[in-house]
Image (cartoon, rainbow, N blue to C red):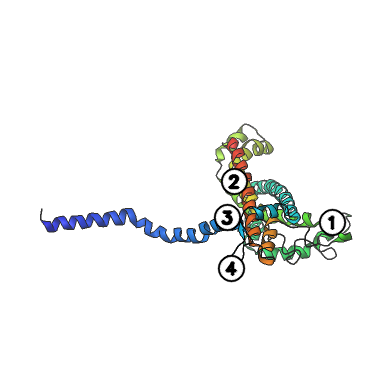
C-alpha cells in the first residue's frame, strides 16, 4: 500500500472519529453553556450570597456567617409567610387533585360534544394569570361580584372576600385558595387525562363482563392504575404551590392581602426583601430555606409513590 493511500485512510479514520464520536458534543456546547450561565452559576451564587452578611449590590459584604438565616427564621413576617404557604399548599393541592381526577375521568368518556368541555377546562392554560386574577377580583367584589350574587340566591349574606372588615381579613386566604384550586386544575387535568388514555381498555372490558359497576371500576381499576400519574401531578403541583406568588398579586393591587401583611407567602416575602428592602443576603437565605422545604416534601412524596407502582 502506498504512503498516499495510508495517509488518506488515516485522514478518513480521523474524520470518522471526529464526526462520529465528538460531533454531538459540538451541538451540546450551547446547551451546557446556557445551563452553566443561567442555572448552575445562579444557584451557586445564591448559596454563597446567603452566608454573606450585609451583602450589597456592589459585591461588598461585612462577613461570612449564619446571621442571615437566623434573622430570616426569627422574622415574624417570614414565619407568617411559611404558615400561609403551608395552608395554601396542603389545601389547594389535595382538593385540586381530587377534582381533577373526577373531571379528567368524565372528559375521558366518548360522548358527543366533549371537545367543548375540553376547551372550557383548558382555556386558563393559555390565559395570562394576572389577567385572570383581575377578572376574579371583580367576581369576588362584595357588592357587585357574581360570587356573592350566587350565594345570595341560596340565602347567604354578602361576604367581604377582599376587604378588611372589622380591622381583619378572615376571608383573604379562602379567596386565594379558591382561585388557586381553579388555576391549578387545567394543567392537572391534562396530565391525568394523558394517564387515563394510557390505561389498557381491556381492563374495563373485563370488569364490565364480570358485572362491575361504574363506581367499582373507578375505585378498583382507574384510580390504582392512575396512581403513578396522580403522584406525579401532586409533586409538580406541590412545587408550584410552594412558590405561590401570582395568585396573591391581582387581588390586592400587588400587596400581600387586604392588610398588606396578613397574606405573606414565602416567595412574596423574598421578593419584597430583595427588591424593596435590598436585603439581598436575607432574601438568598430565605430562597435556600424554601428550596430545602420543597426538597424534603418532594422526597417524602417519592417515597410514598414507590408503594403505589402497578
Nearer-the-camera pick, 236 or 126:
236
Q: Find the distance from the CA under tag 3 to the CA under tag 1.
A: 49 Å
Q: In the rendered image, which quarter is residue 48 located in?
A: bottom right
Nearer-the-camera pick, 85 or 94:
85
- Mark 3 sits on what residue? 47
Q: Position of residue 296 (x, y in %)?
A: 62, 44
Q: Find the distance from the CA under tag 4 to the CA under tag 2.
A: 42 Å
- Mark 4 sits on what residue? 58
Mark drawn on residue 151: 1
Instruction: Look at discs 3 and 1 and give the one toward the viewer.
Output: 3
From where the camera sits, is residue 113 visible? no
Reading the chain from its start, which is encountered first: label 1 or label 4? 4
Q: Position of residue 102 (x, y in %)?
A: 68, 46
Circle 2 SS class: helix
Crowding near the residue tagged with mark 2, few <14, some 14–19, many ≥20 C-alpha atoms within 10 Å: some
Crowding near the residue tagged with mark 1, few <14, some 14–19, many ≥20 C-alpha atoms within 10 Å: few
- Mark 2 sits on what residue? 232
Reading the chain from its start, which is encountered first: label 4 or label 2? 4
Amino acid at each position: 500500500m502506498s504512503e498516499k493511500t495510508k495517509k488518506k485512510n488515516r485522514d478518513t479514520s480521523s474524520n470518522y472519529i471526529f464526526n462520529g464520536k465528538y460531533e454531538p458534543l459540538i451541538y451540546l456546547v450551547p446547551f451546557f453553556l446556557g445551563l452553566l450561565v443561567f442555572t448552575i452559576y445562579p444557584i451557586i451564587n445564591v448559596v454563597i450570597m446567603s452566608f454573606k452578611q450585609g451583602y450589597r449590590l456592589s459585591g461588598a459584604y461585612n462577613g461570612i456567617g449564619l446571621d442571615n438565616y437566623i434573622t430570616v427564621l426569627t422574622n415574624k413576617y417570614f414565619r407568617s409567610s411559611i404558615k400561609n404557604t403551608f395552608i395554601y399548599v396542603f389545601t389547594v393541592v389535595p382538593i385540586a387533585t381530587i377534582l381533577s381526577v373526577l373531571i379528567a375521568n368524565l372528559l375521558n368518556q366518548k360522548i358527543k360534544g366533549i371537545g367543548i368541555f375540553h376547551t372550557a377546562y383548558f382555556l386558563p392554560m393559555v390565559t395570562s394569570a394576572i389577567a385572570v386574577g383581575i377578572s376574579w377580583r371583580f367576581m369576588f367584589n362584595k357588592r357587585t361580584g357574581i360570587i356573592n350574587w350566587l350565594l345570595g340566591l341560596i340565602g347567604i349574606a354578602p361576604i367581604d372576600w377582599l376587604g378588611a372588615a372589622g380591622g381583619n381579613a378572615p376571608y383573604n386566604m379562602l379567596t386565594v385558595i379558591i382561585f388557586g384550586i381553579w388555576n391549578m386544575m387545567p394543567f392537572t387535568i391534562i396530565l391525568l387525562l394523558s394517564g387515563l388514555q394510557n390505561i389498557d381498555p381491556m381492563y374495563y372490558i373485563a370488569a364490565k363482563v364480570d358485572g362491575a359497576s361504574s363506581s367499582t371500576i373507578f375505585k378498583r381499576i382507574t384510580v390504582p392504575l392512575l396512581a403513578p400519574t396522580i403522584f406525579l401531578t401532586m409533586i409538580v403541583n406541590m412545587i408550584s404551590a410552594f412558590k405561590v406568588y401570582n395568585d396573591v398579586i391581582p387581588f390586592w393591587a400587588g400587596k400581600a392581602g387586604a392588610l398588606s401583611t396578613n397574606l405573606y407567602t414565602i416567595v412574596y416575602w423574598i421578593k419584597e426583601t430583595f427588591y424593596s428592602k435590598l436585603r439581598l443576603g436575607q432574601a438568598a437565605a430565605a430562597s435556600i430555606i424554601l428550596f430545602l422545604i420543597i426538597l424534603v416534601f418532594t422526597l417524602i412524596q417519592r417515597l410514598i409513590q414507590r408503594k403505589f407502582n402497578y
